[in-house]
Amino acid sequence: MDPYTPAIHFRSVSYESGGKQILKNITGSYPAGKITTLVGPSGAGKTTVLKMCNGLLSPTSGEITVDGRPIREIEPTTLRRHVGIALQDAPVIKGTVWDNLALPARLQKKELSRKDAEGWLEDVGLGKEYLNAKATELSGGQRQKVSIARTLVNQSEILLLDEITSALDRTSRREIEELIVRINRKYGTTILWITHNLEQAISIGDYAWVLMDGELIETGESSLLVHPADPRVAQFVKGGSE
Amino acid sequence: MTPLSLALTLIFVIIPLLLSKTLRLGLEKDTLIATVRSIIQLFAVGYILKFVFESDSWIYILLMVALMIFAAVQNARKKGKSIPGITWKITVTIIAVEVLTQGILLGFSIVPPEAQYIIPISGMIVGNSMVLSILFLNRFTAEMEAHRDRVELILSLGGTPKQAIHAQLTDAIKASMIPTIESQKTMGLVQLPGMMSGQIIAGADPVQAVQFQLLILFLLLTTAAVSSILLGFLSYPSLFNERMQLLREQTID
Ligand SMILES: Nc1ncnc2c1ncn2[C@@H]1O[C@H](COP(=O)(O)OP(=O)(O)O)[C@@H](O)[C@H]1O
Ligand SMILES: [Mg+2]
């Protein structure tokens, strides 16, 4: 029935925490090899959806499948390498950019080669001279790039991005948008991108999910954001991108 | 000490009471309560010890030690409320330290197997194990609050809970052990340890007193290391579930 293959599928997913219904009966898919954006007001449950996709959280009810396999049947560390995530504030570990890039390999007791590290940095538009830079002293944009490069080390087929440009200036935002599109084209990576910025969602995303108050109220091609059918989405679109 | 000289020691209570009153520090009530409590508690312990020593029965020795451990656990558990099952984890830790140290002391006949040795040494071990547990739990819960994002980052990159929490765990273990190690460096220079002072006042040979004090100091190093590390490794798994997810803030009780 679907015109595309779903990389991730949510079937009647609900999530409750602290007596609060955070996700309400969500059913929907993320098409493989495409960029899908997740838009909605803050507190809508976007981060929660993302963390469920790589098993940092589990649904209270319902089921999520990755490439057709239920997530709860996949060993967590395997799942998390397959579905990488760049977290909202681009946390880095103490040490150099090299230490950060070597981290995913070290967690598997493997060594990252210098040459591979330089390759991943190049993918995010950073020169190899950055390898010895202190990670905590980088600018927001650079840190975000390191955070993305770090997820590339695991060669994830699905990449989750949580508001990776909302704290950045226009130039850095453009750079990150371009490099994500590049990664999507080069490796065929399925991308799930949370963004506040509707303009960005329309220009970068192939598909969009609109989430409000824990409900998935619209899904479809990004153009739905231009002429939304649901009045709540129309209201949100008119309100602009905060 | 004669009863008269013991009574005269109350002068040292009257001085702070007068000072508090004239300077309106408002500490009179607390000072009085502290004085009365210490008199009652210490005499009670004194008579109980006397009874236990004279009865020379293992049952009473074990009962004493069990009581100490129970009191220590009650004190320390308040600091680890956010960790599920912390009460039995502290209990296991303190019992393990007590068994290990007494096992070595008695096994190698370092001290004679008599109540007179076992009970005061147990008191010091249990007391220090309790303090170390509190120091560890304070630091560990603070580290976890401040660095949840780092722990989650490592999980998100495919790390195990042990890998994810490694930095916070070792930081907390190290931080809790440092006071013990540091205080031993200045031992004898800045202050005479209480136990040694007590022995010397009671008429023991100072060199003999030093030997016992060294024994205690070394024991406390083991107590510190084993308490923090054991409690650390018992505590961290309950912060995660079987899906290797970091559990959200929660409190027991
Ligand atoms: N650790 C948590 N414990 C309980 N509730 C949480 C926690 N984190 C987020 N929430 C709640 O879940 C809801 C959705 O949060 P989130 O997924 O972060 O939204 P978004 O990313 O869209 O801003 C919010 O109402 C938030 O208060
Ligand atoms: Mg969010």
Image (tube, grey):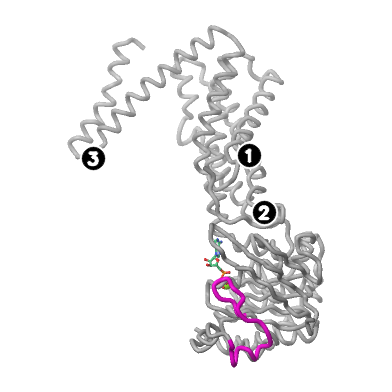
Of all chains, the one bearing label 1 is: B
What is the distance, in whole Å, between disc 3 and disc 2 at their CAs? Answer: 47 Å
Q: Position of residue B197 (x, y in %)?
A: 46, 24
Q: Earlier in the sequence, mark 3 or mark 1?
A: 3
In this rendering, the label closer to the viewer, 1 or 2? 2
- The residue identified by callout 3 is B25
Q: Position of residue A106 (x, y in %)?
A: 77, 62
The stretch in magenta equals: A210-229
Q: Quadrant of residue A224?
A: bottom right
Q: Report whether residue A89 is seen.
A: no
- The residue identified by callout 2 is B166
Asked if the magenta segment contains residue B62, the reply would be no
Residue positioned 64% across, 68% down in the render: A25
Q: Is A93 positioned to the left or the right of A167 in the image?
A: right
Name the amino acid type tagged 1.
Ala
What is the distance, in whole Å, between disc 3 and disc 1 at their CAs? Answer: 40 Å
Vertically, is B131 above or below A100?
above
